[in-house]
Image (spheres, rainbow, N blue to C red):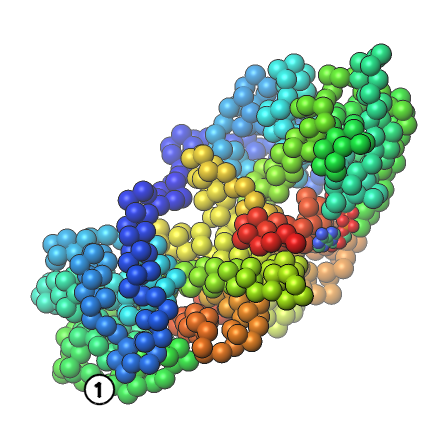
Amino acid sequence: MDLNFTPAEEAFRAEARAWLEANVPVGLPSGDTAEGFALHVEWEKKLFDARWSVVSWPEEYGGRGASLWEWLIFEEEYYRAGGPQRVTQNGIFLLAPTIFEFGTEEQKARFLPRMAAADDLWCQGWSEPDAGSDLAGIKSRAARDDERGGWVINGQKTWTTRGAFCNWLFGLFRTDPDAARHSGMTYLMVPLETPGVTVRGVERLDGDEGFAEVFFDDVFVPDDLVLGGVNEGWGVAMATTSSERGLTLRSPGRFCAAADRLVDLWKRQAAAGEHPERVESMRDDVAQSWMEAEAYRLATLADVTGLVNGVSQGARSSLTKIFWSELDVNLNETALRLLGPAAELIETSPAAVDGGAWMKGFEFALSGPIYAGTNEIQRNVVAERVLGLPRK
Amino acid sequence: MHFAFTEDQLLFRDTVAEFFANECPPEKVRWSWDDEVGRDASTWAALAEMGVIGLTVPEAFGGMGMNEIDLLPILTEAGRYAYPAPLVETVAVVAPLLAESAPSEIAEKWLPGIADGSVIATVELDGQPFVNDMHIANLLIAQRGDRLFAVPGENVRSTAQVSVDGARRLFSVEWDEADAELIASGEAGVQAANRAFDRGAAATAAMLVGLSEQMIAMTVAYVVDRKQFGVPIGSFQAVKHHLADAELKVSFARPVVWAAAYGLATNSDEVAREVSMAKCFASDAAEVVARKALQTHGAIGYTTEHDLHFWLKRSWALASSWGDALWHRRRVAHILLDN
Ligand SMILES: Cc1cc2nc3c(=O)[nH]c(=O)nc-3n(C[C@H](O)[C@H](O)[C@H](O)COP(=O)(O)OP(=O)(O)OC[C@H]3O[C@@H](n4cnc5c(N)ncnc54)[C@H](O)[C@@H]3O)c2cc1C
């Protein structure tokens, strides 16, 4: 057991820290509005130009060929420096691992560098009005068009994060309506500029237009936009959802940075002396939140040690997803209780503490137990696939 | 970075686990409840023979000279089998304390006996008023303010206290300084006592992980087997979610406990925080797991005829000794907030 990073890894950290401290933008507006999104894309391009946007990817696709450990270090430094959540995440963290695993060489060369550079912006099209937790219930149909060499899509996706600002969508479509529920689906990549696509933004709980509905009306997609095999989309999609539950989407750096900010908030509230009893009574909860973030960091170090030695997390990634999503809610809830009467003030309110970031963070955190497979579904997975309880 | 145990550490652990599986089955735990002494010398002697009792004793005194990273996985196995003898006190706390802080003549007097199994040691620290296994101990290490003493067992007057865990043997103790040898005093005494406390807390956390894992295993076996409404109760989602919550708690306590082992073994600057996190998470986990285990067993778990209660009660006892979750959470709060 050795919990030290190597000198080379520490040098990598120092380089990342220096660059991030000099370059991370302060006070970017939410990336879930049209104006905010554009500013975030500018920041992501800057990251790419300095080759920090996808550190773990091979150099030919815009990365640094960094190890998993270096990637974790980068994430830690990114959030430590106050970097904003990545608006490119659905591409770089969810689609990219799938392209690396299932894509053709041509697809890799075509999509990965533009994704890394934030030239293409990707959204994720799984959910449909009648298919949420029960993803295999999707109905959107892609019919064979032999003449043109491709597929014609009709149907609708929903809850598509940042769909209104992206130019590409990846998702699952039913290509063999007669096949069994989990078969007959194909993973397609769809340019949203294609005739027949209509995107309608939907306002989320926090007031931003972060959701979208995407309608497909005889939308033609050529064969080279199929990822993995025709009718094999379920298996391909499952690879993406496991990245979403596990490590790649939610590295511990973000939660550790938030926990440090919570400690700092407590100290500022204590120094201000306005609600001494409230502040005093919140000590244990602040410590608990900080410890949960630290526990998540330690669990990640153990998981990554496993990964680099060839032991994958498997269904245990469901435990990871429950833990990070619930710790995020607890942490933000703790901050709001610390704020008391100021908790409800949002960004545009002059007296808001930290620009209303805690309420915003709370609202965002509340979605964690819902997206990426609800926590009820994850608990089913833990019981059945980790503990071996009977499905029926 | 490598946050895992070595092959050798795991092999040693597995050997000890196999030993407990044979020598400390539930009937043996039941015997510990019923028997007046409740400890059998042969198991201790066999553990000494295997090197477990002398694991932390320096090689110069006949031990293995190993550290917490080697020891804690073994204590997790002791917890899994609810082994009742004072491994935490003798192996995790007293042996390293004597090796590190005692004058050489005191260390020489006791450490070889610990290593060969002839000396059983226990400990009384401030804030830890009840002493485990004084009835079989040859040596008590006790704190008085900033002084630490070694008290030979025969010089200790003890009054039995009764734990909810009938396999435990707890005592209030009295002794006279004239009958004791001073180990350390002043700043050195306080430091040695603090370090002893941290070692005991981390070791107990490791035991709680094993207890929790075993309660989950017993409960999984039960809910797969037990049928109601014509199906295994483990197929009901409410039951599944209780068990998933239990698994979640222990899964995120485990790495925190290993980090405390590492912190102790490497003299980390942040060892107080690391240990307190470990005991806090392990205590909380065990309490949640115990609740879930009992709830999903139903009435059978509520009898003393079923074995589950041995684990429930050991969990309650260990969750609140060496600092409970509240105490340790407050220590972390103090470290984080008051500077
Ligand atoms: C912020 C956010 C971003 C999102 N982004 C995207 C995106 O980019 N692309 C995309 O495709 N989707 C996205 N989603 C949608 C998300 O994947 C779904 O919300 C999720 O799969 C749950 O589906 P649902 O909302 O239809 O809820 P339902 O499936 O209708 O579930 C409602 C409730 O019933 C419970 N429930 C359902 N089935 C079971 C069961 N078998 N056992 C126990 N309880 C059950 C659920 O746990 C939940 O509590 C996003 C959601 C949110 C909140």
In the image, farthest residue toward the front = B230
Dot 1: within a 10 Å radius of its alpha carbon, few (fewer than 14), some, or many (20 or more) residues? few
Q: Does the beta carbon at disc 1 come under 8 Å from ligand 1?
A: no
Nearest the viewer among A339 and A249 is: A249
- Could you tell me which residue is drawn at 64 percent across and 66 percent down? B228
Q: Is residue B203 above or below residue A134?
A: below
Nearest the viewer among A170 and A31 is: A170
- Could you tell me which residue is drawn at 30 percent across and 86 percent down? B160
Q: Position of residue B232 (x, y in %)?
A: 61, 61
Tell which subunit mark 1 falls on.
Answer: B
Q: Residue B266: tell me if it is visible.
A: no
Query: Left or right: B243 with respect to B270?
Result: right
Residue B234, quarter of picture: bottom right
Q: Secondary structure at mark 1?
A: strand
Q: Position of residue B45 (x, y in %)?
A: 18, 65
Nearest the viewer among A176 and B59 is: A176
Q: Residue A129: tell me if it is visible.
A: yes
Q: Is residue B19 above or below residue A275?
A: above
- Could you tell me which residue is drawn at 40 percent across and 44 percent down? B3
Residue where numbered disc 1 is placed: B157
Nearest the viewer among B16 and A285 is: B16
Quarter of the C terminus of chain A within the rendering: bottom right
Q: Position of residue B118 (x, y in %)?
A: 14, 68
Quarter of the N terminus of chain A within the rendering: top left
- Could you tell me which residue is drawn at 63 percent across and 52 percent down? A391
Amino acid on which disc 1 is placed: Arg
Query: Left or right: A211 with respect to A239?
Result: right
Query: Left or right: B54 with respect to A334?
Result: left
Q: Position of residue A318 (x, y in %)?
A: 59, 47
